[in-house]
Image: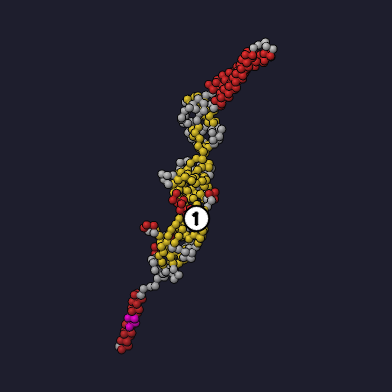
Amino acid sequence: MKNYFLLSVGGFLMVSLLVAGCAQKQGALPVMPPPEVGVVSIVSETLPVTTELPGRLDAVRTAQVRARATGILLKRIYREGSDVKEGDILFQIDPAPLKASLDSAQADLDKAKANLESTKAKAGRYKVLVAINAVSKQDYDDALAASLQAQAGVEAGKAAVETASLNLSYASVTAPISGHIGPAQVTEGALVSQTEANQLALIQQLDPIYFDFTQSSTDVLRLRSLFDKGQLQKVATDEAKVTLLLDDGTNYQKPGKLLFADITVDPTTGMITLRAEFPNPDHILLPGMFARVRLEQAVARNAISVPQRAVALGAQGSATVMVVTADNKVEVRSIKLADAIEDKWTVTDGLKAGDTVIIEGLQKIKPGMTVKPVPFSGT
């Protein structure tokens, strides 16, 4: 009986100790490790200063095809929407009336030549006779004048033949430039004339192609001020990198070149016109299309930049980033932004080389928290 009592008491104590131990374990809070955050180390670098500006594509050369002779249009020879070369025959005007005019002019020339021979011979005879007083001086002068008039008649006849010949050649309407030709504006059987306002067709040279755009004169003055202060280095016009961004958001693969920047400011808009040129062998770019151009206008030496995804933009243009201090604490840092360069912001104040900026894991941290920084390797 005594041994049973001792066993019971011992068992009770053991169970009590186990229950107490379990209760103590359940009530203890586990220590969580600091969260990992992806970070980048800020470095100073040489960065291009680019500007995105809207504009419109335009053909390098545009020519209106017009008739240079009057007549009935017999045939359209070219294929609408095709590429033509300078000198290709596009339309054929009825040449019969023009050929008749040329024949008439040639006949008049032959008549003038015959008259010239007759008057020259008469003037030659009178020259001999006037020397022996066989004819009067007046008769000789009249014969000489008639010969000179006949010579002028021949020259006029030659000009008339040349004009008629040109008009006959104009019966074949040719392409004034090489390029892409659109639909015909007239049909066979129409009466066309060099005096009509309507064009026969339109040719546009598409390779290369122009991109005309504008930039605020205020931005130009700001850049010049930075150049003068030495904060930016100017890029020469023929060295400026020009990239075209199409209306669907894609980048045109072929780089362009900046041709010129106008020196005149539009008084109504305060804008300066610029022009770039792009190769367009596949005719992807068409006149009249809207696009944007990314223009490299300067180079910033020892520039500080930060990935755009690390920047939180607030009201009135304020910007902040989360940085990791030397003791792995999170700190909010206000920064001043300048230009956007691809997927980065250039920073003029608030960051320096060597700072560690958090770019991934921002949603799970707050200022003052201890974190475990790891190099960011994502995209």
| Residue that sits furthest to the top in the current view | 134
Amino acid at pointer 1: Asp
Residue 200, compared with residue 110, is above or below; it is: below
Q: Nearer the viewer, residue 377 or 121?
A: 121
Q: Nearer the viewer, residue 366 or 13?
A: 366
Q: Nearer the viewer, residue 256 or 180?
A: 256
| Residue that sits furthest to the bottom in the current view | 2
Q: Position of residue 169 (x, y in %)?
A: 56, 26
Q: Nearer the viewer, residue 109 or 103?
A: 109
Q: Residue at x 58, y 22 (%)?
A: 156
Q: Residue at x 62, y 13 (%)?
A: 138
Q: Position of residue 47 (x, y in %)?
A: 50, 57
Quadrant showing the N terminus: bottom left
Residue 74, compared with residue 332, is above or below; it is: above
Do we see residue 41 in this rendering? no
Give the side of residue 167 with respect to residue 347, left or right. right
Do we see residue 3 in this rendering? yes
Scheme of colours in the image: secondary structure
Residue 280, compared with residue 232, is above or below; it is: above
Q: Which residue is mark 1?
A: 228
Q: Residues within 10 Å of mark 1 (few under 14, many from 20)?
A: few
Q: Residue at x 53, y 33 (%)?
A: 175
Give the extent of the magenta segment.
Answer: 13-17
Q: Position of residue 294 (x, y in %)?
A: 48, 50
Verify whether residue 163 appears in magenta.
no
Local SS, label 1: helix
Q: How many marks?
A: 1
